[in-house]
Image: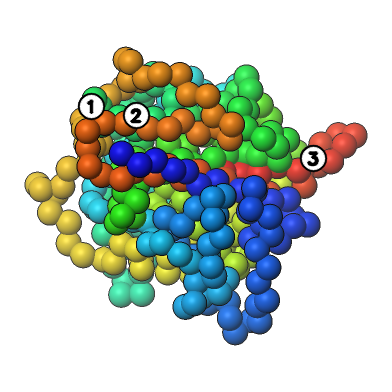
């Protein structure tokens, strides 16, 4: 099975949103009429190759095919180990509210996206992994002791998506929150970042949405202390309604169980990854599917803390 990965990082406020870690700055000359709104995550890997602008929307990267979940029913799970100051119940509440915001987006027709997002409960596994010979879970987790990626002081979270390289179908997604800095439940906080804001943005990536060129959007590439973004804007709603057009969901046939079954523990024989950019390559198998892991990270504006200024990325 052929593997590859993509790393897309948010940058601090002073850097254009299309700054791509490892790939330099993609020089785009955009006029306001070129900016058409939301972007989709794609199979093109900007860390390995130069992804061209999307001809239909030059504010977005093109190349490859767009990512999407091929099923309306998707489950997610929360790691039991929560960050200091956040209870398990608060973590569940924030995660459920964030997924619900996307699921209940009011599309132009008045209906909601064809999504049924279900909390499968807590898990002990805290790894990024996608197994093809045992169960999986789409995990939301905190990284409290160490942020194992570059630019820890600029990063707040990352979302890792495993997908079929040929079709762009998402098979698994895991979300990590950088809790080496204080994460709060206070949207107005001036010293840290609101959990609900982080999760709402990351779940956009979870669903296959890339950064938006519109500053007001939840999916814009920067965030700022005290600037809560927990309400989807029209651009965010257009994105999720475009990816998952409203349609009746047959709950009886809807299967939110992850690919290859549901597992609350990590794979038994998973070899320890040695990531240079924090991603864990999926295990190889006899499956003919071409799988790719894409890591989507989110940046934010400089963070003010007593006596110093810090920048962070959301993921
Ligand atoms: Zn992001």
User: What residue do we see at 61% from left, 27% from top?
Assistant: 148
The residue at the far bottom in this view is 33
Residue 310 numbered tag: 3
Which secondary structure lies at badge 2?
Answer: loop
N-terminal-most mark, 2 or 3: 2
Which secondary structure lies at badge 1?
Answer: loop
Q: Quote the CA–CA distance across marks 1 and 3.
A: 42 Å
User: What residue do we see at 37% from left, 56% from top?
Assistant: 67
Give percent across and percent down for residue 35: 58, 77
Residue 117, can we see it?
no
Query: Left or right: where does residue 256 sit relative to residue 239?
Result: left
Q: For mark 1, what is the residue?
A: 133
The residue at the far left in this view is 252
Q: For mark 2, what is the residue?
A: 283
Which secondary structure lies at badge 3?
Answer: strand
Q: Mark 1 and mark 2 in contact? Answer it, CB < 8 Å.
A: yes
Residue 263, by quadrant, is top left
Give percent across and percent down for residue 279: 50, 34
Q: Quadrant of the N terminus?
A: top left
């Amino acid at each position: 099975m052929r593997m590859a990965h993509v790393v897309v990082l948010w940058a601090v406020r002073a850097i254009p949103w299309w700054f791509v870690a490892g790939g330099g700055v993609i020089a785009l000359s955009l006029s306001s009429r070129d900016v058409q709104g939301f972007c989709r995550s794609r199979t093109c890997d900007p860390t390995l190759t130069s992804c061209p602008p999307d001809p239909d929307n030059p504010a977005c990267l093109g190349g490859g095919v767009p990512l999407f979940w091929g099923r309306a029913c998707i489950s997610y799970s929360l790691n039991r180990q929560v960050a200091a100051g956040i209870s398990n119940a608060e973590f569940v509440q924030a995660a459920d509210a964030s997924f619900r915001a996307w699921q209940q987006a009011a599309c132009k027709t008045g209906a909601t996206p064809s999504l049924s997002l279900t909390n499968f409960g807590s898990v002990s596994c805290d790894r990024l992994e996608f197994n093809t010979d045992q169960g999986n879970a789409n995990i939301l987790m905190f990284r409290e002791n160490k942020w194992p990626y570059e630019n820890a002081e600029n990063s707040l979270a990352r979302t890792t998506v495993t997908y079929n390289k040929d079709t762009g179908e998402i098979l698994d997604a895991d979300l990590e929150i950088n809790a080496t800095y204080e994460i709060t439940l206070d949207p107005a906080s001036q010293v840290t970042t609101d959990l609900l804001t982080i999760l709402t943005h990351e779940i956009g990536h979870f669903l296959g949405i890339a950064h938006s060129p519109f500053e007001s959007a939840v999916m814009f590439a920067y965030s700022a202390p005290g600037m809560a973004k927990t309400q989807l804007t029209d651009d965010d709603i257009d994105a999720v309604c475009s990816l998952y057009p409203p349609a009746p969901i047959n709950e009886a046939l809807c299967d939110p169980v992850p690919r290859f079954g549901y597992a609350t523990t990590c794979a038994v024989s998973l070899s320890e990854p040695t990531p240079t950019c924090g991603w864990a390559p999926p295990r190889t198998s006899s499956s003919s599917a071409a799988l790719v892991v894409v890591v989507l990270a989110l940046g934010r504006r400089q963070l003010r803390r007593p006596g110093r200024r810090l920048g962070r990325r959301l993921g």
